[in-house]
Image (cartoon, rainbow, N blue to C red):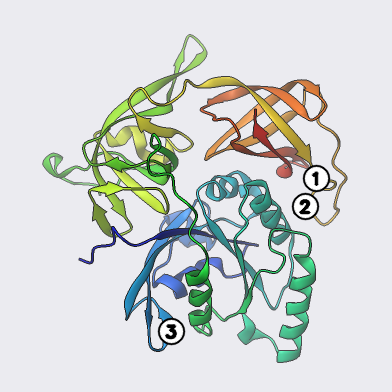
Amino acid sequence: MEDISKLPVLNVGIVGHIDHGKTTLLHALTGRFADVHSEELKRGITIKLGYADAILRKNSDGFNVKEGDAVRYLTFVDVPGHEMLMATMLSGAAIIDAAVLVVAANEGIKPQTREHLVALQAKGIKKVIIVQNKIDLVSKEVAMKNYQIIKDFVKGSVAEGAPIVPVSAQQGINIGKLLEELGSIEIPERDVDAKPLFVVARSFDINRPGTKVSKLSGGVLGGALKRGKLKVGDEIEIKPGLSIKEKGVVKYETVKAKILSIRRGVYEVEEAGPGGSLALETSLDMFLTKTDNLSGCVVGLVGEIPEIVNRLKVKASHFSEVEGTETHEKIDDFRINDLLMLSVNTSITVGKVVSVKDNEINLELNIPVVSFLKDSVGIARNIGGHWRLVGVGEVI
């Protein structure tokens, strides 16, 4: 199997409104679908974060994923576009370097298109490519009108000036141009010398029913290494870890484990640096990692992860109006006793505002987190029964 250890890695989020073709586009780019959960296949929508990867290659005909010299390794995160899955979207945005914003040419700008663009800004994602999908379903005139609507829509945002690539993911039209744009995105600087910090977006049991005990694999953590390096054999700790209820009180217990194997997509590596999605097979019992039990945790070498916190101080600002709805409701200032959903790295928690001073808010958390100074925070408020992104902040 090809050695990918020397290839630069780019982790790309596929974002946009439900049914605008994100999962089909991912298949056109990589040759595989990220929807592998039975409920997702049945309902035809992405519910959890999906992953796929490809080696970007270049030959005399341009960029592709099949033939030519290997240029970079692309990992993709398929982010749900349904309005009820905002927390999952924010978790996905925490592990990506760049984003492809998908807009269907036959539908245009929809509520979750707006909300996802705001979420990219909230999580500090500034490298954006816009895909105008489903051009095979509209006339040239409609496509050009839609193109102009997209340009106007992104003015003043992180996507202003971003390339707009017309494609048909279903028909495979112009995918080469999109790959070319993905090949031109500057790879972020990676801090390989820092203490390793891995954020967990998914955790699961990869064993099939009926697997012999001697053949069982350990629990798997999926996510991204933000900095530092991890290698097979490293002793790691996972925080906040497992929630345990004792006498009606929920406590969190740090989990320790050993890394048994590391995978980037289908490739097994001995050591991994920052960038791209990774899967860490650990010595944990798979019961502990199944069904995303440890998603939202952070991983580091034993003794190197800060203690969990139940209070958070955030320098915050809110938007003028709610995106993701047709009403564009005005957003009120943060106030004491507000309940806010906070996205810190891949962790999602709800905090109660206990004090507000200027643009600084103090919150008591219902689920503790591991936070670092200047971590970006997405802030959502429950509006009309749905969590809506209303502001951004950073940990102080």
Q: Which residue is mark 2?
A: 323
Residue 102: image location, x then y, percent = 62, 68
Give the mark nearer the N terminus: 3 vs 2: 3
Mark 3 → mark 1, Cα distance in angstroms: 42 Å
Provide the secondary structure element on which disc 3 rests: strand
Q: Which residue is mark 3?
A: 62
Would you say 110 lies left or right of 240 here? right
Mark 3 → mark 2, Cα distance in angstroms: 38 Å
Q: Residue at x 55, y 59 (%)?
A: 98
Q: Which residue is mark 1?
A: 319
Query: If the image is split into quadrants, where does the N terminus sit?
Result: bottom left
Would you say 142 lies left or right of 347 here? right
Provide the secondary structure element on which disc 2 rests: loop
Residue 392: image location, x then y, percent = 71, 41
Give the mark nearer the N terminus: 3 vs 1: 3
Mark 1 → mark 2, Cα distance in angstroms: 9 Å
Provide the secondary structure element on which disc 1 rests: loop
Q: Amino acid at mark 3?
A: Gly
Q: Amino acid at mark 2?
A: Glu
